[in-house]
Image (cartoon, rainbow, N blue to C red):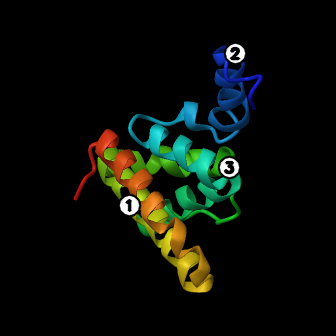
Amino acid sequence: VRSLSSDLESVRKIYEYMFYLVSKSHLMPHPLAFAHFDASVNHGPGNSGKFLQRTLNKLNCRVDVDGVVGPKTLAALSKCLQNHDVLEVTSIYCFIRLTFYNAIVANRPDQMVNYNGWMNRLNKVKIYCGVVN
């Protein structure tokens, strides 16, 4: 990590290839793409994929919740965006992410020490995405 601190291009490539492209964030409209990318970094691409799939299911755009953002999930997202504003989708995505954090603390009370940091991160994402409620 220290050797990377002076090589920002290498850091950018790591984030691009390991999180942005793997999560398929590049195939989503802003601000959902940003919220999904941030969740991929924080929770891993599999969990962020499940957040997206749960979001789609909440909006009645049915898809299996397996964490894989593949052709079926992307097709469901495309169909969902025909009937729902991207801000609505992003807001629900962020709410599902909040429930994930809450479940962590409910199952592992020792993780409460991280909760304020998680909430700060999520609130910054919501502000950037324009979905503060």
Q: Earlier in the sequence, mark 1 or mark 2?
A: 2
Image mark for residue 125: none
Q: Earlier in the sequence, mark 2 or mark 3?
A: 2
What residue do we see at 39% from left, 46% from top?
125
What residue do we see at 66% from left, 38% from top?
19
Front tag of 3 and 1: 3
Please name whichever residue, 125 or 26, is drawn nearer the observer in this view of the structure. Answer: 125
| Crowd class of label 2 (few under 14; some 14 to 19; many from 20; radius 10 Å) | few
Q: Earlier in the sequence, mark 3 or mark 1?
A: 3
Residue type of the residue flagged with mark 1: Ile
Residue 64 at x, y = what percent?
65, 65
Residue 80 at x, y = what percent?
42, 52
What residue do we see at 68% from left, 24% from top?
11
Q: Which residue is mark 2?
A: 7
**For residue 63, which quarter of the picture?**
bottom right
Query: From this viewpoint, is residue 35 visible?
Result: yes
Q: Which residue is mark 3?
A: 45
Quadrant holding the N terminus: top right
- Pointer 3 with pointer 1, Cβ within 8 A: no
Label 1 SS: helix
Residue type of the residue flagged with mark 2: Asp
Label 3 SS: helix
- Pointer 2 with pointer 3, Cβ within 8 A: no
Front tag of 1 and 2: 2
Residue 99, compared with residue 131, is above or below; it is below
- Pointer 1 with pointer 2, Cβ within 8 A: no
What residue do we see at 60% from left, 51% from top?
42
Residue type of the residue flagged with mark 3: Pro
Quadrant holding the C terminus: bottom left
Q: Which residue is mark 1?
A: 92
